[in-house]
Amino acid sequence: MEPARQADLTRQRILEAGYAEILRHGFQAASVANILVDTGLTKGALYHHFPSKKALGLAVVEEVIRAYLDAVMHQPLRHAASPMSALLGLLDSKSEPTEDDLRFGCPLNNLMQEMSPVDEDFRAALNSVLREWQDAIRDTLLRAQGAGEIRAGVDCHAAALFIVSAWEGCTGIAKNMQSRTTFTACMSQLRAYVASLRTP
């Protein structure tokens, strides 16, 4: 039996390998055999931590994708002294795509497109992550509105929905076109929209 610390490390290795495999191939085409090769583990070790491929996929959504968004987007926005500056700064920091962004796109968006129509558990998990992202943007806009940084008439809920939708759209189109220029141009327009919400 694995000691607790070793078990945690083994589980984390499987999650990371599972995420990489799903990012490269999608969930349905993801290969458990490839994950085993990447981790050097046996099938029994993998299924000890995740009883099925689906359980691993859902854990990737919850523990990798959700955790990433929380660390790089939600937390910085929640703790920002100036909500509007933080949101614009976040858009600036994401304006240049990585090679993986262009090649593989957004893992959240990829899974929504692939799995939401065919699996209710995936749809619910992905919708929860998406809703958290939208709520983080909405709360940021509401705080900015309360501080007088954006116009009083802005519908923060609708604006947050648009911002998240446009962000995902920029990534999806850039992936399809394999175009850094397309992504940068799209994100610059999104930033301009957010900046336009400011109080004159």
Image (cartoon, rainbow, N blue to C red):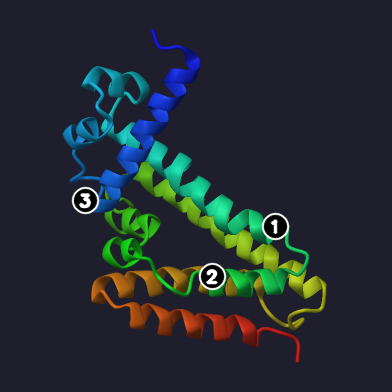
The quarter of the displayed image where residue 182 is located: bottom left
Image point 58% across, 68% down: which residue?
90
Which residue appears at 73% of the width and 80% of the height? 150
As measured in the structure, the alpha-carbon distance from the residue carrying label 3 to the one carrying label 1 is 33 Å
The residue at which mark 3 appears reads as 25
Which residue type does callout 3 highlight? His
Q: Secondary structure at mark 2?
A: helix
Q: Identify which amino acid the numbered label 1 is placed on.
A: Arg
In the structure shown, which secondary structural element does the residue marked by tag 1 occupy? helix
Which residue occupies the foreground of this view, 97 or 19? 97
Q: Is residue 69 above or below residue 2?
A: below
How packed mark 1 is, by other alpha carbons closer than 10 Å (few <14, some 14-19, many 20 or more), is some
Instruction: Identify the residue at image location x=37%, y=39%.
Output: 16
Residue occupied by mark 1: 78
Label 3 sits on a secondary structure element that is helix
| Mark in front: 2 vs 3 | 2
Distance in Å between CA atoms under marks 2 and 3: 27 Å
Q: Are marks 2 and 1 in contact (CB under 8 Å)?
A: no
Image quadrant in which the C terminus is located: bottom right
Residue at the extreme bottom: 200
The quadrant in which the N terminus is found is: top left
Q: Quadrant of residue 144?
A: bottom right
Residue type (three-letter) at the residue carrying disc 2: Ser
